[in-house]
Amino acid sequence: MTEKALPESIYKLFARTGHDVRGPAGVVAGALDELERALGGETTARNAAFFTMARRGVRRLLRLADRYTAASELSRQQDAQVQSLDLEPLVRQAVSEASFVYGRRQVTVALDLAPLRGFAHPSSMTAALADALMLALRAARARVAVELAAHGDKARVVLTSDADTTSVEELFETALSPEADPLDEGALPVRVIDGVLRAHGGTARVERVGAETRITLEWPLNEADRKVGAR
């Protein structure tokens, strides 16, 4: 199954929003780098903390831009050119980015990533993985575990959160319902996750397992199986 078609004007709006957010955020990011270089070794611990706060804010905007860009490409994702690559660095990069931007002091992120060769459209899959971790972090009380492993002929990423609510399941259900508003910003991360995985011939699902919430992203290891899984 492919992305449910929206009016072309919606995809253009997503693309324009991503562009309009990324431009100014990139300028601010560059200015922060220049300012820190200008200060040289005179940066105090207090100033360093302020720089980190500012960078997190800018990176959050850049993540938002990535999300809108990925959303703008969902209708064409099925035909997007993918690459054969090592999946472990891809997952690690997405986790690092999302942890920096959305991390919470009281929540730890544990990684168990197996070396695995597969395929992906790097930028869109990174966006989907980062948004999945964002949802897991928001729901967690103290811990999120991220696992990457082969499951038969598929790559499987499992994000397990010690969440004590059903908020993530409810968000997925609402965002993917036929009546969902495509412009609902809260639903957009789920649409990106689901759309990107479908375009890779895979699936994204959320389930409650005991006292934990589990987000599972799964797609074929072999690119030749991509079209079959996406039907």
Image (cartoon, rainbow, N blue to C red):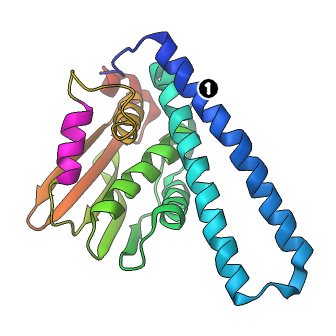
Question: Which image quadrant: the C terminus?
Answer: top left
Position of the N terminus, as image quadrant, is: top left
Among the 4 quarters of the image, the one containing residue 41: bottom right
Q: Position of residue 126 (x, y in %)?
A: 51, 47
Estimate how packed mark 1 is, as few (under 14), some (14 to 19) or many (20 or more) residues with alpha carbons within 10 Å: some
The residue that label 1 is drawn on is 16
- In reply to whether residue 168 is colored magenta, the answer given is yes
- Name the residue located 51 percent from the left edge and 13 percent from the top edge: 9
- Residue 74 image offset from top left, x and y in percent: 46, 25
Residue closest to the eye, 68 or 75: 68
Between 42 and 2, which is closer to the camera in this rendering?
A: 42
Q: Nearer the viewer, residue 153 or 37?
A: 37
| 44 is higher (above) or lower (below) than 113 | below
Amino acid identity at mark 1:
Arg
Residue 35: x, y in percent?
Answer: 85, 68
What residue do we see at 46% from left, 52% from top?
Answer: 130
In the drawing, does residue 61 fall left or right of residue 226? right
* Residue 80 visible (yes or no): no
- At 21% from the left and 21% from the top, the residue drawn is 178
Q: Position of residue 75 (x, y in %)?
A: 45, 19
139 sits to left or right of 11: left
Q: Which residues are magenta?
A: 167-176
